Image (tube, helix red, strand yellow):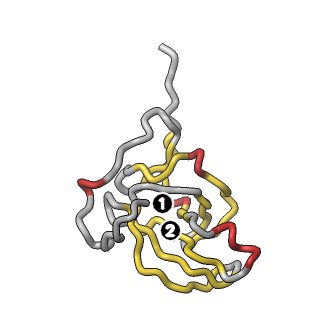
Amino acid sequence: MSNQPPIAPTSDTKSKVITAFLDHPTFSCANCAATIALQDELISKAFSGRDGRGYLIHSAVNLKMGKREDRALLTGVHTVADVYCMGCNDRMGWYYHKASDNSQKYKEGKYLLEREKLVKENKWKLDE
């Protein structure tokens, strides 16, 4: 994420979507196909989101942050902010700002992305 202030989730930001990572396996938004993260950034698939399974990811692009709030999650209270796709404003998951429990500090600065909101783009090339 950049050092610029977050863009309101209702803003029209489609023109700002980054389409980087050519030839690298990525996760994309299931709604608008905006690139969200490199598959290499995946930490764990064993997380729970609001709507089912989630992925813990080191870093992501084409997301804007909502309001920071304290939220009671399965592993305790965390300070999080929902994250929204810059292409379509769909809620993709959340960003961990702070964890109150020392055993959960490893999540700080990382993203929980809902599996159902992502498409796995493998970028395979067939031999011709």
Residue 109 is situated, as x and y percent measured from the top left of the image, at 57, 66
Amino acid carrying label 2: it is: Gly
Q: Residue at x 60, y 60 (%)?
A: 55
Q: Mark 1–mark 2 contact, CB under 8 Å?
A: yes
The answer to whether 81 is drawn above or below residue 124 in the figure is: below
Between 89 and 5, the one nearer to me in the picture: 5
Number of callouts:
2
Is 74 situated left or right of 9 in this image? right
Question: Which residue is label 2 attached to?
Answer: 93
Question: For residue 44, which numbered disc appears in the image?
Answer: none
Quarter-wise, where is residue 88 in the image?
bottom left
At 33% across and 72% down in the image, what residue appears? 9
Q: Is residue 123 visible?
A: yes
Image coords of residue 53 (percent x, y) = 61, 64
The foreground one among 86 and 104 is 104
Q: Residue at x 56, y 72 (%)?
A: 96
Residue type for callout 1:
Lys
Query: Callout 1: helix, strand or loop?
Result: helix
Considering only order in the chain, which callout, 2 or 1, is on the residue closer to the N terminus? 2
- Label 1, residues with CA under 10 Å away: few <14, some 14-19, many ≥20: some
Percent of width and height locating residue 30? 43, 54
Residue lying at 62% horizontally and 85% vertically, measured from the top left? 72
What residue did someone put label 1 on?
117
Foreground mark, 1 or 2? 2
Cα separation between marks 1 and 2: 8 Å
The kind of secondary structure element at disc 2 is strand
User: Does residue 58 appear to the left or right of 36 in the view shown?
Assistant: right
Is the N terminus in the top left, top right, bottom left or bottom right quadrant?
Answer: bottom left
